[in-house]
Image: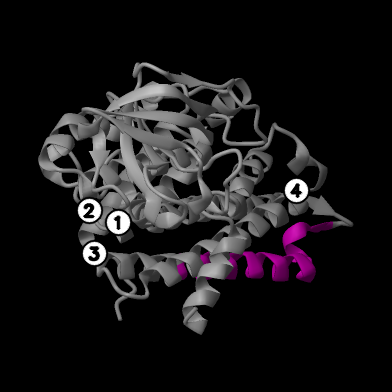
């Protein structure tokens, strides 16, 4: 059991850290305040290989491991958690095309996705099916060389901005086995978008409904066979859960470091905050939770890399624990700052807002518990 990083992994981490410090941290507050989708910075991240971290290199990907991805997303999230999370989603959807698409599909879409010339969205959730994803209603009906799609997807990161939409829709009967995956390109007839949602956090990435009204999509855009869609979606989410949890770790680490520095300079009752044992204990717990989260994520990532049978359960465990624990670290940091932590002059409140949704998306933490329990009980 090796807990150290290789020389290459250290270099990958340092590259991501330097990029975050230079091209994300100085601008994150502005992106959040003005809801800026930072296209230029995203494409600069892509130039470093961060848009196709575990996409194969023949189409422009970096062909790295899931553990490498966890290192990258933790560092990017220190700079801007919202933007790092968008890059995570872009990676997840690109990987689905890379892993389950045929050679023509891979060549058609992935070179422009790995460079972020084009952006991609993952479309599973619907207004009436969130946690019960297999109950989705959006339907695709075969019509000659096309499928005709009708339905609506909700809470789509990149909705209205992305060029490519990886969509799970129903081609067969009820339940998971009736779901297929399609790539829908921007400009497809019958494709439209809802209003840009106003959100608590994640303001550097647009979110909107994706609407299909007799939307015609070539049959050649189907990824895999009919009925494979739910399996493809869930495979994508294993990695997505690790990435979003790694983003939580990055945010928590940034808050922890800010709180520790604040304790060294802020005085109350004639003493520095760092001299109060209650706050020392709180800081120790915060550091322990970050470390435990990181270890769980790295172990789960290594299991995904090995395609281990227990990978899905460990991804669910790690996502649940890390996103809960790291949100609490952000909250504890805000408490240490007191009233100052509630002001937008300090970044802690932004990290807290951006990490709150991590306990909901990529499968709610209640669903993560359900996945783990079913595996443990053989249900």
Give the percent coordinates (x, y) of residue 87. 39, 39
Look at the numbered disc 1 and give the secondary structure of its residue.
helix
Kindly identify which residue carries mark 4.
337
Q: How is the image coloured?
A: one colour
Kindly identify which residue carries mark 2.
64
For this orientation, the residue located farthest to the right is 269
Mark before the other along the chain sequence, 4 or 1: 1
Mark before the other along the chain sequence, 3 or 4: 3
The one nearer the camera, 68 or 183, is 183
Mark before the other along the chain sequence, 3 or 1: 3
Kindly identify which residue carries mark 3.
6
The one nearer the camera, 271 or 196, is 196
Is residue 47 visible in the rendered image? The answer is no
| Residue 68, label in figure | 1
Please say if the residues under marks 2 and 1 sit with CB atoms less than 8 Å apart: yes
Q: Give the residues drawn in magenta, as a range.
A: 271-296
Circle 3 Cα neighbour tier, 10 Å, few/some/many (<14 / 14–19 / ≥20): few
């Amino acid at each position: 059991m090796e807990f150290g990083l290789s020389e290459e992994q250290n270099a990958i981490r340092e590259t991501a850290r330097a990029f975050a410090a230079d091209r994300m941290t100085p601008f994150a507050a502005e992106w959040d305040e003005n809801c800026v989708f930072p296209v230029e910075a995203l494409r600069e991240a892509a130039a470093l290989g961060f848009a196709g971290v575990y996409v194969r290199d023949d189409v422009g990907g970096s062909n790295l491991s899931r553990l490498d991805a966890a290192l990258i997303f933790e560092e990017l999230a220190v700079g801007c958690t919202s933007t790092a999370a968008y890059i995570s989603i872009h990676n997840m959807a690109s990987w689905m095309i890379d892993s389950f698409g045929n050679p023509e599909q891979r060549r058609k879409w992935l070179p422009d996705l790995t460079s972020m010339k084009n952006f991609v969205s993952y479309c599973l959730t619907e207004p009436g099916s969130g946690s019960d994803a297999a109950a989705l209603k959006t339907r695709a009906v075969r019509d000659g060389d096309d499928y005709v799609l009708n339905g609506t997807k909700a809470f789509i990161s990149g909705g209205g901005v992305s060029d490519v939409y990886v969509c799970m829709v129903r081609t067969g009967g009820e339940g998971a086995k009736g779901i297929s995956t399609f790539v829908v390109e921007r400009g497809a007839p019958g494709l439209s978008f809802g209003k840009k949602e106003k959100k608590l956090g994640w303001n550097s990435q647009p979110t909107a409904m994706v609407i299909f009204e007799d939307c015609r999509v070539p049959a050649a855009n189907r990824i895999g066979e009919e009925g494979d869609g739910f399996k493809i979606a869930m495979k994508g989410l294993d990695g997505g859960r690790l990435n979003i949890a790694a983003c939580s770790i990055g945010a928590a680490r940034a808050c922890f470091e800010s709180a520790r520095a604040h304790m060294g300079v802020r005085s109350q009752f004639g003493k520095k905050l760092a001299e109060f044992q209650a706050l020392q204990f709180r800081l120790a717990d915060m550091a322990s939770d970050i470390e435990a989260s990181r270890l769980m994520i790295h172990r789960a990532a290594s299991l995904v890399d090995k395609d281990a049978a227990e990978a899905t359960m460990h991804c669910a465990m790690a996502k649940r624990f890390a996103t809960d624990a790291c949100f609490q670290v952000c909250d504890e940091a805000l408490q240490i700052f007191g009233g100052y932590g509630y002001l937008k002059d300090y970044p802690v409140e932004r990290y807290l807002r951006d990490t709150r949704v991590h306990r909901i998306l990529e499968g709610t933490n209640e669903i993560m518990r359900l996945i783990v329990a079913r595996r443990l009980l053989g249900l």
